[in-house]
Amino acid sequence: MPVKIKFSPPHIDQRIIDEVVDTLKSGWITTGPKTRLFEKRLTGYTGAKATLCLNSATAGLEMMLRWFGVTAGDEVILPAYTYSATANVIIHCGAKPVFVDTGDDFNISVKAIRKAITKHTKVIMPVDFGGWPCDYDEINSIVREEEFLALFTPGNIVQQQLGRILILADAAHSIGATYKGKRTGSLTDVSVFSFHAVKNITTAEGGAISFNLPAPFNNNEVYKNLVIKTAHGQDKDALAKLKPGAWKYDIIEAGYKFNMTDIHASIGLVELERYESDTLPRRKEIVNKYNQLLKKYDWVVLPSMKNSEKESSYHLYPLRINNISEEERDMIIEHISAKGIAVNVHFIPVPMMSYYKHLNYNITDYPVAYNNYKAEISLPVFYDLSFHDVEEVVNALSDAFNDLGLRPETQHVMIETKAMRI
């Protein structure tokens, strides 16, 4: 059956189209003034000290590992419950991913981090699953404890300057989320956002590094260094080379091709401008509608979205179903999909992937992560999803649950006669 309710299509309207056309007509379509403006506005929004935009969050994570000098023999701690990119960048650097279990909220277990730190640990990579911030005060304090400061063995001058394990947050899902009154991007040493097509803010493809490194680091100097490193090690960007007589440049290191273009940044500029006033409130309305309709079912576990310390970015709606097997969860998804409704699972834990199984990782070592995974179904959340659509999704979920004989019959929600959007 054709898909009638998609999972997470981007909200591309005339404002974005006009901004992209303006870029195309400007004659400057690669990294240029709009990319730099987007960086500046992201810095203002997050409260970070500096921001570098790149072509993906994956590039941002790898760039920071390489900047910190992570290499063979080093270990990086990360949650088993994440997308493969978080682990792949560690492999690219020749280091060892050290997976740890998660808590009931899907995020990395602080207790598990503590147990996993060794003299080889160079970086901890917490992941803000679904837009829900990790426990950053606790994570930040762990690496400053005397026991772990004494264990840290710097392998280069950058590591020596920091003098401890680096906290590199995979904040791909969490732009706009808050923790103790501060936005993600300003909560730890370095955070990396994703602007992929399905994210809350999109640039089609793209990402950004938010810098909050402590003294003696100068975050603006680190930014400038990484501008060079992410553009093939070229000591002048294209804008600088346009100045009369300034065509000469040098390659000062073997860099990477990770830059964001002005075409992508032009989408991001519009997205960021309306994020707090329009996009985030709309996503919150959709999540609240799901909560209203689903709270009466005792077989569901509603996701964490807000408490006294944290508020999500409302990126995902990761519903869990009580006392269900992985096979039964998959059957429910098949039933829902047969009605033309797209749902998803976030994520298959990385130790379950063939590549990582061949490296002798085993999901049985991460029981909480597996229990979360086997029960999880991500329901659609996107700007143009109507309340009528939300009701259809909930009814399809209820029908699937009943048709499979998992529970006695439950009542449908009342579907409104016309779609509501407020």
Image: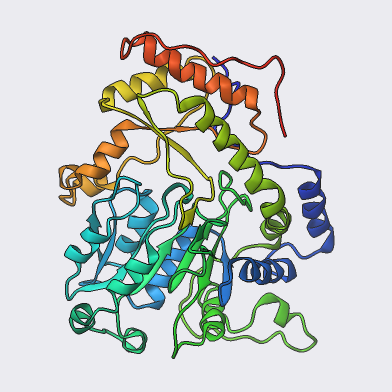
Image location (x, y in percent) of residue 338: 48, 15
Image quarter where the N terminus lies is top right
Location of residue 400 by image quarter: top left
Using the image as rendered, state which of residue 273 and residue 416 is in the foreground: 416
Residue 73 lies in what quarter of the image?
A: bottom left
**Figure check: 247 above or below 359:** below
Of residue 415 and residue 185, the one placed in the foreground of this image is: 415
Whether residue 172 can be seen here:
no
Number of numbered labels in the structure image: 0
Q: Residue at x 47, y 82 (%)?
A: 253
Depicted 221 relative to depicted 121: above or below: below
In the image, residue 245 lies at what x, y percent?
77, 89
Q: Residue at x 24, y 43 (%)?
A: 368
Q: Identify the residue at the far front of this view.
A: 308
Left or right: 302, with 123 as reference point:
right
In depth, the one of 209 and 248 nearer the eye is 209
Q: Position of residue 158 (x, y in %)?
A: 37, 85
Q: State the scheme by which the image is colored.
A: rainbow
- Left or right position of 317 against 83: right
* Residue 124 drawn above or below residue 244: above
Quadrant holding the C terminus: top right
Residue 162 in the image, given as x and y percentages of width and height: 35, 85
Q: Is residue 212 left or right of residue 275?
A: left
Q: Residue at x 66, y 28 (%)?
A: 386
Q: Is residue 232 left or right of residue 260?
A: left
- In the image, is residue 56 above or below residue 167? above
Q: Is residue 214 visible?
A: yes
